[in-house]
Image (spheres, rainbow, N blue to C red):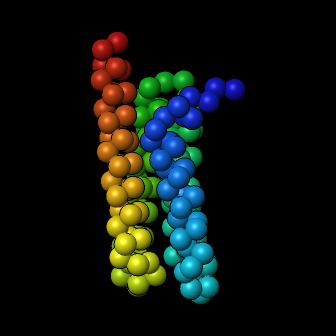
Amino acid sequence: MHRAHKKLDVWRESVALATHLYQVTEKFPKTEIYGLTSQMRRAAVSIPSNIAEGAARASSKEFAQFLNIAGGSLSEFDTQLEIAGNLRYLSGDEKQIIDQKIGSIAQKLAGLINNIKKKASER
């Protein structure tokens, strides 16, 4: 089984983000378990999952497509983080830490997509 995704920094960072998010949302109100908590967890898990699925695909075009989907999930998660922050479910420091992780992942995703497109155009 091909496991190229495990070599990608962006995949490792997004797994760490999802894991961290699970720990953070444990402190959310129990009334949010089927609401914001569930939505945030799904979006966070979707990021590394789509990176992994894309890395397993045969073509660069498909890989880039799944990386774009991961980027969409990252944007969705970022929006949910803003809402959680507005509701004061997280401390300002915690939100800032997660914001920094989102920024790093977004930058790495964009770089990887550009790299894949560049290599595909050289063929």
Q: Nearer the viewer, residue 30 or 59?
A: 30
In the depicted structure, whether residue 96 falls above or below residue 44: below
The quadrant the C terminus occupies is top left
The residue at the point 36 percent across, 35 percent down is 113
Could you say where residue 106 lies in the image, as x and y percent from the top left? 35, 49
Residue 63 drawn above or below residue 15? above
Hey, which residue is sitting farthest right in the picture?
A: 1
- Asked if residue 68 is positioned above or below residue 60 in the image, the reply reads below
Residue extending farthest to the front is: 93
Kindly indicate the quadrant of the structure image that contains residue 6: top right
Residue drawn at x 30%, y 19% is: 121
| 94 sits to left or right of 27 | left
Q: Quadrant of the N terminus?
A: top right
Q: Is residue 66 among the parts visible in the rendering?
A: no
**Along the line of sight, the residue nearer the viewer: 71 or 82:** 82
The total number of labels drawn is 0
Q: Residue at x 49, y 24 (%)?
A: 59
Q: Nearer the viewer, residue 50 or 16?
A: 16
Residue at x 44% of width, y 78% of height: 90
- On the image, the x and y values in percent for residue 14 come to 49, 50
**Along the horizontal axis of the image, is 86 left or right of 44?**
left
Q: Quadrant of residue 75?
A: bottom left
Q: Is residue 90 visible?
A: yes
Identify whether 77 is placed above or below 57: below
| Percent position of residue 86, x then y | 36, 82
